[in-house]
Image (tube, rainbow, N blue to C red):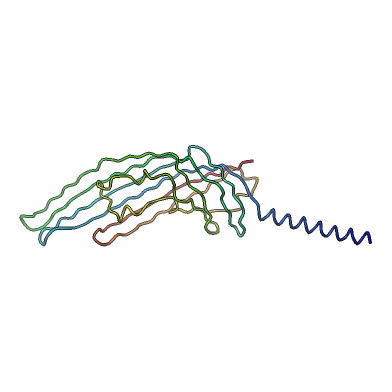
Amino acid sequence: MWHLRFGVLAVLAILLVASGSALAAKSSSARFRVTLTAALTKTWTVTRSAGEPGCVVTSESLGKWQANLAGRSAGRIRVVSAGRDRVRFVGVIRALAGSATQSGTNSVVGQGAPPCGRQTKTVRCEVQRRSFRGASTTLTNPRRRVLVPARLKGVGVLRSFSPQCPEEPSEVASIRTDLPLATGPLDVADFFRQNISRFFVRGDSQQTTMIAGEVEGTVHERVRWTLTFTRVG
């Protein structure tokens, strides 16, 4: 009788240990200090035409917007296993600071029969500059093997440039170049390998958008970022 009870207790103990191990595996987590650097670029060319038959005036604008940012201090992020090569990021990357510039040219070309003639006038726009601090972002793992930073918060100043020179019509201004344009390759196992104290994830993507209608042109975007994960503890 004693042996039977001992056997039952032993089986229960094994089951409890196995159950505990399964729970531990599901709740695997690791902590990191995370730093972010990024460069965001948007360039555009837009044209619009007006006038009368025999005398057409075409305006053309070439613009470039560029922002660079980096963390003033490392953010604290906890990475939690979500199963099937997926993770969940808990925490916010704060204290991001940087600067942005906008530059370009506005040109007007008139052409047609006399007295209209042909004339070209180009104005080089003054470089506009902005700086910011206190921005933030979070990290996501939307699908297997992919890491994507969320949209930046606290960077309204980056969208405050004058749209007059270079001309930035609403069709261009509505394209707000941001971190999620670029995705990075992710090996989930790296988070839980204790022998890996530091590693990097990089994203670099480009995209071109065509604009048609009253305003015609192209908008080209490029986003590059680097995340550095340093294990804590």
Residue 128 falls in image quadrant = top left
Q: Quadrant of the C terminus?
A: top right
Residue in the foreground of this view, choosing between 144 and 81: 81
Spot occupied by residue 215 in the image (x, y as percentages of width and height)? 25, 58
Identity of the residue drawn at 49% across and 42% down: 94
Q: Is residue 115 above or below residue 195?
A: below
Spot occupied by residue 38 in the image (x, y as percentages of width and height)? 44, 45
Identity of the residue drawn at 20% across and 53% down: 59
Residue in the foreground of this view, choosing between 2 and 69: 2
Identity of the residue drawn at 46% across and 43% down: 37
Residue 174 falls in image quadrant = bottom left
Outermost residue, left side: 115
94 vs 7, left or right, is left
Spot occupied by residue 131 in the image (x, y as percentages of width and height)? 38, 39
Residue 58 falls in image quadrant = bottom left
Spot occupied by residue 200 in the image (x, y as percentages of width and height)? 53, 46
Residue in the foreground of this view, choosing between 62 and 71: 71
71 vs 99, left or right, is right
43 vs 52, left or right, is right
Outermost residue, right side: 1
Q: Quadrant of the N terminus?
A: bottom right
Identity of the residue drawn at 57% across and 53% down: 88
Q: How many marks?
A: 0
Q: In this view, does 213 lie above or below 80?
A: below
